[in-house]
Image (cartoon, rainbow, N blue to C red):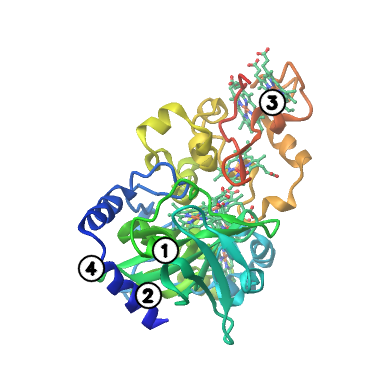
Amino acid sequence: MIDLMRALVSRTFYLPIALLVAISIGIATYNRNASSPIAENDAAHVPTAPGGDSVAGQVPVATNPSAPTLVGRKVCGECHAENYQRHSQHGHAQTFHDVADTDLVAKFAGKQFDAGEGYGTYQYQSDSAGKLFVTLESQFGDEPFPLPYALGSGQHAQTMLTLVPGLDGQTEGIEHRVSCYADDRIALTPGHSKKKPRSTFEFFGDASRGQPLQRCIYCHTTRGAVVGETVQDLIANVNCEKCHGAGSEHVRLARINGKPPPYSIGEESWDTESELQLCGDCHRLPRSVTEKEIREYPDLLVRFQPIGLLRSRCYLESNRELKCTTCHNPHLTIQELDRTDHVRDCLRCHESGKEAHVACPVEPKTGCIECHMPAIETDQGLSFHDHWIRVRED
Ligand code: HEC
Ligand code: HEC
Ligand code: HEC
Ligand code: HEC
Ligand code: HEC
Ligand code: HEC
Ligand code: HEC
């Protein structure tokens, strides 16, 4: 594997100058790449609670001895058993993996996939340690390229990520060109159909580095940083303390007399907008997309629920009542809900006879979601519910 890395790196030295220029342009424009649904172009942003505690989880390094530290979700589960159980079933709790710990090895090993014109045919194989590799014979003979990490719970899809040393020594993250979808379908990763390899490594997928690469890890983990070819200090998945902040002080005080002082969402300053900042930090806020996208609201934006919600009259005209947790228990996966739960959420405000808000003149009791926030297909059969709740023209 190390040999392959070296071989690939040294190969890149032989790339023609024009391609090198293209690589650096590619890197420079990565941030503005609006065609990829997971391209991210906002600066890292950590909403802060009073006292400077980070809310969205970029937990401060413990330079201050009294600063709270991470205790891990099991400890939270000792006293909050129900949220612990629920969270275990949520996509948040299973969105970052070692490929060797998943069934992706069994799903891919021995299979071939035609990666399309300009790429060639991938051949997948595993070794005795249960690690997964891919080869691309037309370009690199039988040299295996490792596929060590997988992102995604599989509810929608899982995509593999490889960390490799770039030309200048900076790490590049290669998001594999092929993903496994919910029905075990193996197909191109969302957003990859129009891509072309801009460097040697990009024969295996899309490269990112620097801040966008760190953000990829940030959004899918509780803690972790890309150092060299691994993720260090890793706490995989979006756990309790990613949202609530480091909990050691809360736990210590709760153990003393069972009446801990306000913590996280218990703080007086916690309001609708704090929550939208928290969820929007990963599910995206308007600052994450281009001006053109904000103006035109293309279908791809339905993937970014907060952006839609912030346009809705339900949010704008409800006097700060409507937020994500009006309809989502943040610990309970949507798989556990059915349509009647959602209709009930709408009727909290829109029931006929309630004076504060209007009721639907077309269908006042059922079917709200299908007509006012339908699922819209984006790419590769994935679909997302349009959170711009509105009377639609179509
Ligand atoms: C030793 C028991 C204990 C442990 C362990 C514990 N909590 Fe709590 N937690 C409590 C108690 C007691 C309350 C107050 C409940 C109440 O007043 O209804 C509370 C309240 C909360 C609240 C509500 C906000 C507030 O200010 O009241 C949140 C959020 C919370 N805990 C999160 C966590 C997280 C995250 C962890 C793990 C880092 C954790 N708790 C670990 C006992 C515990
Ligand atoms: C640290 C980043 C992060 C934060 C903060 C975050 N999410 Fe997520 N969320 C994710 C990721 C990543 C996934 C994809 C999980 C997967 O792999 O399927 C996800 C998936 C979801 C899902 C669908 C999966 C399921 O099982 O239901 C819902 C609903 C959701 N988030 C709601 C929220 C809400 C509400 C908030 C705020 C209270 C929030 N998220 C905050 C990263 C985050
Ligand atoms: C700004 C935060 C953010 C960044 C950066 C980010 N993701 Fe995600 N990712 C999410 C959220 C939120 C979801 C859940 C989307 C949903 O269900 O609405 C998600 C979902 C996914 C999924 C599940 C399938 C899907 O398309 O919904 C995969 C796979 C994934 N991300 C891979 C990656 C990879 C690989 C990178 C980096 C190269 C990355 N993500 C960067 C926040 C992020
Ligand atoms: C995606 C972000 C997110 C994650 C992950 C998360 N929470 Fe929460 N949690 C919230 C939000 C937001 C609220 C406030 C909900 C509201 O206002 O209705 C909350 C409320 C709570 C509360 C008080 C209300 C209640 O439900 O009892 C407790 C306790 C709590 N969380 C514990 C936990 C524990 C324990 C975990 C991990 C097993 C966890 N949370 C994971 C976002 C999160
Ligand atoms: C008015 C109700 C409502 C509000 C408010 C709301 N959602 Fe949703 N959300 C839904 C419904 C309904 C679904 C579809 C659930 C299903 O398929 O069972 C959904 C689905 C999702 C999903 C799964 C992927 C998708 O788009 O289908 C995510 C992630 C999500 N919401 C995140 C959020 C976040 C983050 C917020 C806050 C910015 C939010 N939601 C606010 C009703 C709401
Ligand atoms: C917290 C209260 C609240 C909730 C919950 C809520 N809405 Fe609204 N909604 C409003 C307000 C306020 C308006 C502005 C008109 C009014 O006052 O009734 C509005 C307006 C609307 C409109 C008219 C938008 C337009 O384009 O003119 C539709 C459609 C709508 N809501 C559907 C829904 C659906 C469907 C749900 C559930 C998924 C929902 N709402 C949940 C408060 C809410
Ligand atoms: C078959 C599709 C359909 C279903 C189902 C449906 N709506 Fe509507 N809704 C509409 C249409 C179309 C309009 C616009 C009517 C008009 O302007 O005459 C509308 C209008 C509205 C309005 C704005 C009313 C106003 O006076 O501005 C609200 C609020 C609303 N719906 C909420 C809901 C809720 C809540 C549900 C579920 C209980 C629901 N709708 C179910 C199609 C539907």
Residue 317 picture location, percent across and down: 53, 25
Give SS at disc 4.
loop
Say which quarter of the image contains residue 366: top right
Q: Alpha-carbon neighbours of circle 3 within 10 Å: few (<14), some, or many (≥20)?
A: many
Q: Residue at x 37, y 54 (%)?
A: 46
Real-space Cα separation, disc 3 to disc 4, in angstroms:
58 Å
Say which quarter of the image contains residue 101: bottom right
Res 78 seen here: yes
Which residue matches tag 1?
A: 174
Q: Nearer the viewer, mark 3 or mark 4?
A: 4
Earlier residue among tags 2 and 3: 2
Identity of the amino acid at label 1? Ile
Earlier residue among tags 2 and 1: 1
Which residue matches tag 3?
A: 350
Side of 12 relative to 159 (left or right): left
Q: Alpha-carbon neighbours of circle 1 within 10 Å: few (<14), some, or many (≥20)?
A: many
